[in-house]
Each structure stands twice: as structure tokens, then as C-alpha cells.
Amino acid sequence: MSKNRKPNTILENIRIEAIASEGKCLFHHNDMVVFVPFCVPGDVVDVEILKKKHRYAEGRVVRFISKSEVRAEPFCKHFGICGGCKWQNLPYEEQLKAKQQQVFDQLTRIGKVELPTFQPILGSVKTQEYRNKLEFGCCNRRWFTKEELQDESLNLADDHSAIGFHITGAFDKIYPIESCKLMDDLHNKIRNEICRYAKSIGMTFYDVKAQHGLLRNLMFRNSNTGEWMLLIQFHYDEPSDDALAKQLMQHIAEQFPQISSLIYVDNQKGNDTIGDLQLTTFKGTDFIYETMEDLKFKVGPKSFYQTNTDQAYHLYCVARDFVFRDTDSDLKPLVYDLYTGTGTIANFVARRASKVIGIEYVPEAIEDAKVNSKINGIENTAFYAGDMRKILTDEFIHTHGQPDIIITDPPRAGMHPDVINVILNAAPASIVYVSCNPATQARDLALLDGEYRVEAVQPVDMFPHTPHVENVVLLKRR
């Protein structure tokens, strides 16, 4: 016989003190710091303690006693349940202040390097419908909130398959999303029609634990040229599933002629990544175009492209300004662009460089980068695909020339120490470090600090209503 579970502690009349990491806020209680999501500094609340460690705890608001004056009205009906956009209740000006402080704190506390005065953060051009890419999971049994489970009209035996977002910290739990404000509303119409039609023809939805069910994942992309891409992942359990999948594809193609790139794939793997899968184009092309100034960029389903198109332009303008700061206009530098993706930054700076060499892990992205140079009439670029550690070697630099400037835009994990060592050996005059994670950027700056000083820091907000922030740092050789 199991023991009765002790009820969670409720802390009453708590004033939220400050913004913390990961979109949470905090307050102090006795000798602990307690982290709570979906509230803002100045709120007075009752908090249920969900998890308790030695020096900190995690909780959730169970009652608002009074709400802070520093507060915005959330614009999304799913706020507080969906794991994204945790700062909708924080005015955008306050979000920017928090992100500026986050960059300063991480570069100071983790990097421990000498820093110049930071430039004020560049706020996003749009704060809604700013994303050009979204992914949704499909599940045969959606996740329910405690309040929904207490509804007596709920029949768990009904069909509860759904399309939505994974809830925070649970890979197998999906909450249905009717309307997401992060992308143009057309994607909501398409997604909801997919869900309706799939159920109407008896299509099964994916069970991530049992790994069966036909409808698995959706990925939307749109662009500033008005093009739309939709990639649907299926998981074929039976030979007849292919016909059912194509029936859904045909229906969506007919209902939404705005989709210029309609793609699908049978994914039998244990995860939703598509980098190693062969995709099939059902309708149109297998790419869409983005534009930036007078340049045109081809973006495929496997390509990396900044998800906030308008703000990406401002980010790349900062990077370009840093690249050519204090550079003699008559002398064109040799530039290496590490983690080049589809070559966006490489092509963006190429016309003021003697040559730009881009390196990227994803082969398809490199092919797009080459095409992007070709369609823009840019002839002074060269692109190489492979593991950065294995390609960017001292021998590679000896062959292709010592860079005057290195641009690096690594993933959230930052740069591998081997890559940093090759950069140090290459000894460029300057490094422009674009980062989506100031914490790992700070760690890397500390490793570069012996040979390079930080000359400029420019935070850029690419993701309104989230705690994520981009940061561009200019380093000069000592």
C-alpha cells in the first residue's frame, strides 16, 4: 500500500522581486531562492512549491493577490500553458532592459574579460508575427491541464489527438494550439485544417513513446517574398499509409494555393530531425527565397536562416559594420565565415571583401550558399561542408590563405576548443562573434582573451516575448 503523498507547500502573500533566467522570475524565502514562471516583478502572489533543492526551489503561481504596475496584457489565449513566449506579460521595453542586463551579466560573470561600454540593445522591428519558421508536433493523446481534467464534461475515451507545441520539459506531451501569434495567421488556418481533415479521413496521429501513428510533425516557413513552405513528417506503419498521406497532401495543396513549396517525408527514426532524410516535393519547389537589400537567398527545408527576417537584416548590418570597422576602404580583406549556414552573412559582406570562405556542417545548406552566390552574381566566395573541427585546420588555412577577419556564428553550444585554437593560430586582425547564447559566448571570449580584446558589444533582440537574445562582439588582436 502506497503512502499518502504530502501536499505541496503553499507560500502566501509573496512579492515577486526580479527577473531570472529562462523567462522566470524570483523571490527569496528564508535561505532559498524560489523561481516562478508567468509572473512579473511587483506581483503579489501565492506560490505552490513544486520542487525543492538545498538552496533553491521551483514553484508556480496559484493565486494573484495583486498585479504589478509593470505588466502587459498577454495577447495569446495559450499564455501560461504553452512553454513559449513566457514574457508576454512583461512590457516590451522591460523585456529589452532585461535582455541588455542578461548580456552584461553573462559576459561579466562568466567571461571575466575587460569590456567596453555596451551599445543599447536593438529592439525587434516586429513583436508579433515576426517568425518565418515554426514547428508543431502531432500526438494521439494531447496533454491536459489540471483545470481541464477537473471538468466533468471531459471524456478521456474520446479522440484527443492534436497538433501543437511540446510543453516545457516533456518531450512526449503536446498541448493543442489553435492560434499562435508568432507567425502570419495563414499558418494557423493551414494547421487547423490539417488537424480537421486528418481526423475526418481516419488518419492516426503519432505516439512518440510507442513510435507509431501516421501524422507526426509539421514545419512551416514563409518569407518576405510572400512564399510559403510546408513540410509534413509522416510515420508509415502500413503500406497503405502512403496513399492516405498523399490524400492529405493533395487536400492541403488544393485548399491553400499560397503554399509554393509542399514537401513530405516518411520519418522512421526516433526523433524529428530531417538532416539525414530524403525529402519528397509534392508540389512546387523544394525551396523559397528571402531577400535582403539587393540580395536574394535560397532557403531549403534543411537550411538554417535567422527566424526573424526583418531583425536578421539589422543583425547582419551590425556584423558587417564590425567586419569593416577601421578597415582601409582601398584594401579588401580575406574573410572566413564560420558556421555560414546558407551563406547569408558571407554573401552580405562579400562585395567589400577580396574573398569570403564559408564553412558549415550541413551539406544542403552549403549547396544553397553556393546557389545564393551564383544568383546574386557574387564570384568571390567559396564554401565547404563538414565538421568545423575537421575542416578548419592549420593546413586548411595554409591552403586558402590567412584570414584578415573571421566571422563566427556558432550554435548555442558555442565553439569547440579545437576551433578556438585554430582561430588563435590563424591570428586574424579581428573577430566578429555573433551568438545566440551570450553564456557560451562569454566562455569563448575568456579563451580568446589572451590574444584579443573586446572592442564593441551590440545586443540584438531577435525573439520578443522570450528571454533569448543575440549578441554581436567585435574583438581586435592585441
Image: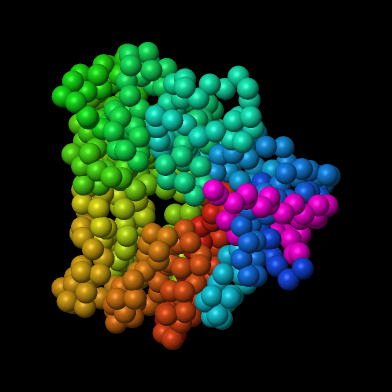
Q: From the viewer's side, name the closer residue of 305 and 106.
A: 106
55 up-or-down from 38: above or below: below
| Residue at 18% in and 72% down | 396
The residue stretch that appears in magenta? 1-29
Q: With 314 as the anchor, is 358 left or right in this view?
A: left
Q: Quadrant of residue 393?
A: bottom left
| Residue at 42% in and 35% down | 136
Q: Quadrant of residue 392?
A: bottom left
Figure coloring: rainbow
95 up-or-down from 134: above or below: below
| Residue at 31% in and 66% down | 335
Q: Position of residue 455 (x, y in %)?
A: 52, 75
Q: Position of residue 283 (x, y in %)?
A: 24, 23
Q: With 327 as the anchor, is 347 left or right in this view?
A: left
Q: With 110 as the anchor, is 200 left or right in this view?
A: left
Q: From the viewer's side, name the closer residue of 76 and 116.
A: 76
43 up-or-down from 327: above or below: above
- Residue 150 seen anywhere in this rendered image of the structure: yes
* Magenta stretch: includes residue 17: yes
Q: From the viewer's side, name the closer residue of 379 and 95.
A: 95
Total of numbered circles in the picture?
0
Q: Position of residue 57 (x, y in %)?
A: 65, 61
Q: With 132 as the anchor, is 211 left or right in this view?
A: left
Q: From the viewer's side, name the closer residue of 88 and 303.
A: 88
| Residue at 29% in and 82% down | 425
- Residue 324 seen anywhere in this rendered image of the structure: no
* Magenta stretch: includes residue 267: no
Q: Position of residue 32 (x, y in %)?
A: 70, 67
The quarter of the picture where the C terminus appears is: bottom left
